[in-house]
Amino acid sequence: MKNNLTAFVVLITFLSGCAFGTSQLKVVYPDDLQMIPETQKDKTNSSENKIEIEPGVTISAKWIGNGYSQPTAKSIFGLTNRYVIPYTRLTSLIDLKIDNNSDKYIDLSIKNIKLKVSQNNDELLPLDIDFFKSRWPTFAVKSQEMLIDQSVAIGDIIRTIARDKIIEPKSNYHGYLAFKKLNPSTESIQLMGLIKVDNKEDNIVLKFKKK
């Protein structure tokens, strides 16, 4: 009887350890700056800001804000035991989308994109992959768990960050623009830049205001 009781306690302890975790990831930030398109009247909805720069060529941007999390370890019950924030807590994200329903070629060059913060006229350039590699350095990896965290973070950024791209006719593209984290007191911003459509330069200006 004593052996059976001991085995039962060990089993319960093991299962409790395996079950430890959370079913839904929610990262707590000290601030949560929310921006919406300047022309949007309904502040309860955070919709995309969209413009058509040429017939059939649409540019849209959606404010994401704080970086999202990605699980790196789960229990046998599917609960998350560990996670990373690939884009770190140091950035503000904008989801950029380009829909090319024309017969033209679009040349997207990230160096031609910038974010203007209205109250101080700062002009921020998108952060590149090298910035994030410096935040997730290989030399800092000291364990198998840290290697997994680093690999998941960098892998996610490589898959999702906006890069230079030739967008072919009848296709679309989207990626995250990451900028140095904006101050929570920011009232308005403008996503600005140049995009070439069949070697013709088109200006884009997408304005956002604080929600």
Image (tube, rainbow, N blue to C red):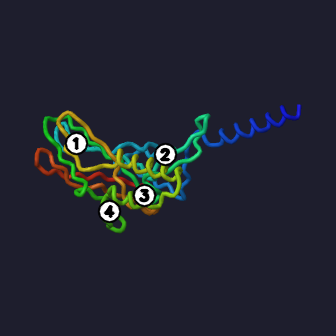
Residue positioned 11% across, 49% down in the render: 200
Q: Quadrant of residue 30?
A: bottom right
Q: Which residue is mark 1?
A: 52
Which is closer to the viewer, label 2 or label 3?
3
Q: CA distance from mark 2 to mark 3?
A: 19 Å
Dot 1: element: strand
- The amino acid type found where label 2 is placed reads Gln
> Earlier along the polypeptide chain: callout 4 or callout 3?
4
Is residue 153 visible in the rendered structure shown here? yes
Q: CA distance from mark 4 to mark 3?
A: 27 Å
Dot 3: element: helix
Q: Which residue is mark 3?
A: 138
Residue positioned 82% across, 37% down in the render: 6
Is residue 211 visible in the rendered structure shown here? no
Residue 57 to residue 29: above or below: above
Q: CA distance from mark 4 to mark 1?
A: 24 Å
**Which residue is nearer to you in this view: 6 or 71?**
6
> Earlier along the polypeptide chain: callout 2 or callout 4?
2
Q: Position of residue 95 (x, y in %)?
A: 35, 47
**Which residue is nearer to you in this view: 107 or 60?**
107
Q: Position of residue 203 (x, y in %)?
A: 19, 52
Q: CA distance from mark 1 to mark 2?
A: 33 Å
Q: CA distance from mark 1 to mark 3?
A: 42 Å
> Earlier along the polypeptide chain: callout 1 or callout 3?
1
Q: Which residue is mark 4?
A: 124
> Earlier along the polypeptide chain: callout 1 or callout 2?
1
> Earlier along the polypeptide chain: callout 4 or callout 1?
1
Which is closer to the viewer, label 1 or label 2?
2
- The amino acid type found where label 4 is placed reads Leu
Are discs 2 and 3 less than 8 Å apart at CB? no
User: Crowding near pointer 2: few (<14 within 10 Å), some, many (20+)?
Assistant: some
Q: Which mark is residue 70?
A: 2
